[in-house]
Amino acid sequence: MSYGQGGPQSQWDPWKPNSQQPWTSGSDGQSPDWAALAEASETRNKRRKILFIGGGVLATVGIGTAVAMGVVSANGDSEASNQPASQLPSTADIPSGGATSTPSFAPTTAPPPLDPKDFVASAKKDTAPLGPDILFPGTQLTVSETVYKKSATADTKSCATAAQGTLPKILTANGCTRLMRVTYTKDDIAVTVGVAVFDTEAQATKAKGQADSKSIVKALSGKGVKDFCSGAVCRSTTNAYGRYAYFTITGFPSGKDVTAKDTKVFSTGDDLADFAFRQIRRRGEAQASAAADE
């Protein structure tokens, strides 16, 4: 078998440099073998595709490795991240909140409310207007379902003149500055309430302590009420609140003596004594409220 010019024809390798493409033995040396070229091209494309696929797999593996390394780096030392749960720091060792924790403030305490009694305990604080018609306003008093009609009122700075028995001496000795009286009636019963004013609570308390069964405020007649309790037996009470000592005397304007069976006389005296206490306390409450709003 003879070969063409240039010696024996070498086999063509599409991936080998300077290799020659094959020609058909029956050709005239000018026309290429198109079938062989197509087959070679197809073989070359298959090899490239395989290489490209393989390269993609390697690239994917490389990216995955880089991401894994990045995650380990972001979470700290790779050895610490692989430690078992028993070797991880306890909850107490893990800081909580840090810079974003809620700021704490020193506790604040609201000032204590004002005590109403303080404002009726001394003349220095008890400066609101005062008088029998202020302390006992209106023309009548209703307690539960009982209505007491208001009659005569009186006001004096000479406390002893409005008292009798042992009370004048007690009021004078303790510095009484004023004695206000008001009378209420209900059916055939009359009651006079007397409020003695002192400069301090201590003076009023002492006067109350010194009072006995003969320490009586004078009953106040007038405005349709006849003289009562000037010679007959009547029922009296004594008490104090703040710088005020208050007294009641209850009886019959008819001159009849009060006995233990006259329960209405007792309830009438108690109602008016309780009203006097509540009015003095309200006086303190009003002044305390005004001072708190300033």
Image (cartoon, rainbow, N blue to C red):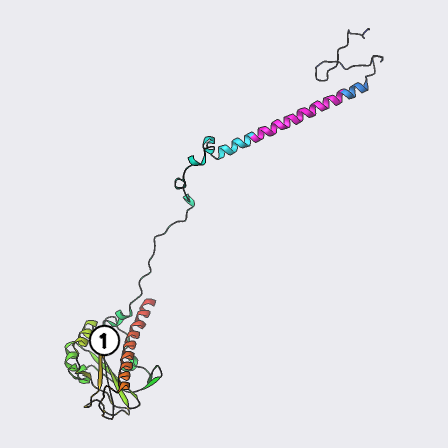
Residue 148 x, y percent position in the rendering? 32, 86
Mark 1 residue element: strand
Look at 77% across and 21% down and name the residue there: 39
- Residue topped by disc 1: 240
Q: Judge left or right: residue 288 versus residue 234.
A: right
**What residue is drawn where x is 68% and y is 25%?**
50
One can see residue 294 in this view: no
Q: Main secondary structure of the magenta part?
A: helix
Tell me residue 59's x, y (percent).
61, 28
Residue 13 in magenta?
Answer: no
User: As shown in the figure, which amino acid type bears the numbered disc 1?
Assistant: Ala
Quadrant containing the C terminus in the rendered view: bottom left
Residue 253, quarter of the rendered image: bottom left
Q: Eyeballing the image, is 227 above or below 5?
A: below
Q: Is residue 41 visible?
A: yes
| Residue plotted at (51% across, 34% down) | 71
Q: Which residues are magenta?
A: 40-64
- In the visual, does 12 lie left or right of 91? right
Residue 231 image point, x, y percent: 18, 90
Q: Is residue 215 above or below residue 75?
A: below
| Neighbours of disc 1 within 10 Å: few (<14), some (14-19), many (20+) | many
Snapshot quadrant of residue 45? top right
| Residue 45 is covered by the magenta coloring | yes
How many numbered dots are placed on residues in this image? 1
The quarter of the displayed image where residue 198 is located: bottom left
